[in-house]
């Protein structure tokens, strides 16, 4: 009694959403107790008494078949067909078994499946569609034989008019195309990412979503309507079953890499990683008929899918709580898919009819997951770029002052040197040194010395142009590369820096520290043969500025310096 009540509620839950799509004319459905001795002897008509003619009355016949053998059904209208357009017999809901129909008026046997290539091109693969005579009468039976593999999930058979079904089929095509297009678009986006970045994780995503998309198309039968897909027709539903297992295994591989689970939750990551291998094995076993996979493999895959999905969500949740940003994207994308996966597995294992909200909700959740994961991949790429930029900054910039370090400023000077020779541009170099900096460090401490360096660098930056570069050459020495500056312009910049530095007052407790700088200016001309010589000339001019009393800028002029050296000698 309890089982019957639970079964009733289950059927109600999955049946109610289908009531709106019921056939115009109710059917009487009967299951033949035994197959007929000869299909050619099937009755072409039955008497229609005033009362019941046998069989239950249903808007949509729910049919299923055993794992072995053939189940025979008889469908009859409760009244003669009076529709404006021709009646259609439609068989829908994951019809994996081969179906033989005997239709009036000739009752010739027609054996078809969702995976055949010669189906009526006017309709999608949402259902197997058969045209019936316009004058179909209630006393004309329709015979259906469901064969191997067994149809454990019920399929729906109904008789509706041509015009109504075309409108319904068009809605289905639009919905299916939308979901498939989203996933296909995400595949193309990530493929472009991979072509540029060559990140192996993008390949995992492409393989996972690609297998999932093929599974959806195989399960709906649309895969077999593509050009050249006739080669897959003999494989039947096994193509979709294999791709479903493969997609599940690949999804685990992708999740482990995307959410960095090995780093944040190593134990759960190992457990989840171990579950991908059974999926890969099952993807192969479906092709081995001696193992009778049709009897046990679908439910095995479904149960394993539920276990792995819950484990993935648990691992993602913990990784997210521990700081994995990508795990948050994974959680956001997979929670709707998890809920619908559980409901789908319950529907399949319990053999309940497939409601419309679940039929479309499942691919919709897959499309949504692909979209969110793609955003997550883009976010991860931005993070990697940010980390790379930070690493570059740490490698090129002085951490105290923010100026370029010695290697970086010499690299910039080398580029400017080459550009100046190639394009015949002017180039000037300033060699700056803080006056009495050792005394500041010794008397005030290194913290005050650091504050003075930071203040001076800011003062120098205020006077440099947008295309100029500033770098810390060592200790309290700095180089400023002035691109396009001649001797007069470079001297003016150096003198402004001297004035700005002299006006600085670095606060130290209740007092302040005054600063001055000495600057040597060297300008590229025919007498300077190398970049190193340019640095030496600026350094020489800087020493000359110190010798003249500090707190000044001196421009290197070869003749003047040679005369000064001669007089000193």
Image (cartoon, rainbow, N blue to C red):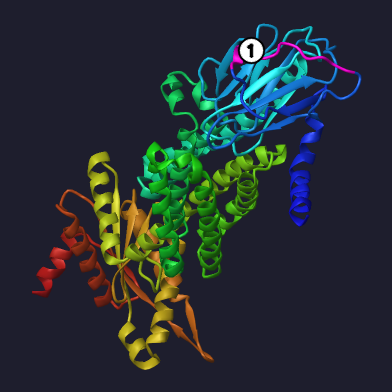
Q: Magenta includes 166?
A: no
Secondary structure that dominates the magenta span: loop
Name the secondary structure under disc 1: helix
Residue shown at 52% from the left, 39% from the top: 186
**Which residue is at 84% across, 21% downward?**
78
Quadrant showing the C terminus: bottom left
The residue positioned 23% from the left and 52% from the top of the image is: 524
Residue 348: percent from the left, percent from the top?
A: 61, 44
Quadrant of residue 79 within the rendered picture: top right
* Residue at image mark 1: 41
In this view of the protein, which residue sits in the foreground, 484 or 19?
19
Which quarter shows the N terminus?
bottom right
Q: Residue furthest right?
A: 50
Residue 313 left/right relative to 76 = left
Task: Decide if residue 14 is in sight here.
Answer: yes
Across and down, in percent, residue 520 comes to 28, 66
Q: How many marks?
A: 1
Disc 1 crowd rating (10 Å Cα; few below 14, some 14-19, many 20+) is few
Residue 57 is left or right of residue 328, and the answer is right
Q: Which residues are magenta?
A: 38-49
**Residue nearer the viewer, 299 or 491:** 299
User: Closest to the observer: 535 or 317?
Assistant: 317
């Amino acid at each position: 009694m309890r089982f019957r009540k639970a079964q009733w509620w289950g059927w109600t839950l999955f049946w109610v959403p289908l009531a709106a799509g019921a056939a115009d004319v109710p059917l009487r459905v009967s299951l033949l107790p035994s197959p007929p001795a000869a299909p050619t002897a099937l009755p072409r008509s039955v008497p229609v008494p005033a009362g019941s003619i046998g069989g239950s009355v249903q808007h949509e016949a729910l049919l299923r078949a055993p794992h072995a053998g053939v189940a025979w059904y008889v469908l009859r209208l409760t009244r003669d067909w009076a529709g404006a357009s021709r009646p259609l017999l439609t068989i829908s809901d994951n019809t994996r078994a081969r179906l033989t129909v005997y239709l009036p008026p000739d009752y010739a046997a027609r054996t078809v499946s969702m995976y055949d290539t010669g189906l009526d091109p006017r309709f999608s693969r949402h259902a197997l569609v058969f045209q019936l005579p316009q004058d179909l009468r209630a006393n004309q039976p329709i015979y259906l034989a469901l064969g191997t593999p067994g149809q454990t999930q019920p399929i729906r058979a109904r008789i509706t008019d041509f015009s109504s079904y075309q409108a319904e089929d068009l809605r289905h095509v639009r919905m299916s195309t939308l979901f498939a297009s989203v996933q296909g678009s995400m595949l193309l986006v990530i493929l472009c990412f991979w072509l540029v970045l060559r990140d192996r994780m993008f390949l995992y995503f492409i393989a996972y979503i690609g297998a999932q998309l093929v599974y959806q198309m195989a399960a709906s039968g649309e895969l077999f309507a593509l050009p050249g897909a006739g080669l897959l027709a003999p494989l039947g539903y096994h193509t979709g079953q294999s791709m479903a297992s493969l997609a599940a295994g690949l999804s685990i591989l992708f999740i482990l890499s995307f959410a960095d689970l090995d780093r944040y939750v190593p134990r759960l990551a190992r457990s989840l990683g171990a579950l991908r291998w059974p999926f890969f094995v099952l993807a192969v076993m479906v092709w081995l008929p001696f193992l009778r996979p049709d009897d046990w493999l679908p439910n095995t895959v479904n149960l394993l899918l539920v276990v792995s999905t819950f484990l993935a969500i648990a691992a993602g949740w913990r990784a997210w709580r521990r700081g994995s940003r990508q795990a948050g994207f994974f959680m956001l994308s997979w929670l709707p898919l998890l809920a619908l996966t559980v409901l789908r597995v319950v529907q399949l294992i319990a053999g309940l009819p497939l409601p419309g909200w679940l039929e479309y909700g499942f691919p919709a959740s897959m499309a949504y997951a692909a979209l969110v994961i793609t955003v997550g991949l883009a976010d991860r790429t931005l993070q990697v770029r940010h980390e790379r930029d930070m690493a570059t900054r740490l490698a090129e910039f002085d951490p105290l002052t923010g100026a370029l370090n010695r290697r970086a400023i010499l690299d910039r000077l080398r580029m400017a040197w080459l550009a100046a020779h190639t394009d015949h541009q002017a180039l000037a170099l300033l060699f700056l040194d803080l006056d009495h900096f050792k005394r500041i460090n010794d008397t005030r401490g290194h913290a005050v010395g650091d504050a003075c360096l930071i203040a001076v660098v800011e003062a120098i930056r205020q006077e440099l142009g947008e295309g100029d570069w500033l770098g810390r050459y060592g200790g309290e020495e700095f180089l400023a590369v002035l691109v396009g500056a001649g001797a007069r312009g470079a001297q003016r910049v150096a003198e402004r820096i001297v004035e700005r530095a002299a006006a600085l007052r670095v606060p130290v407790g209740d007092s302040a520290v005054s600063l001055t700088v000495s600057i040597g200016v060297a300008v590229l001309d025919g007498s300077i043969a190398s970049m190193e010589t340019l640095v030496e000339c600026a350094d020489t001019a800087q020493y000359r500025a110190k010798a003249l009393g500090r707190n000044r800028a001196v421009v290197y002029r070869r003749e003047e310096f040679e005369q000064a050296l001669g007089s000193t000698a």
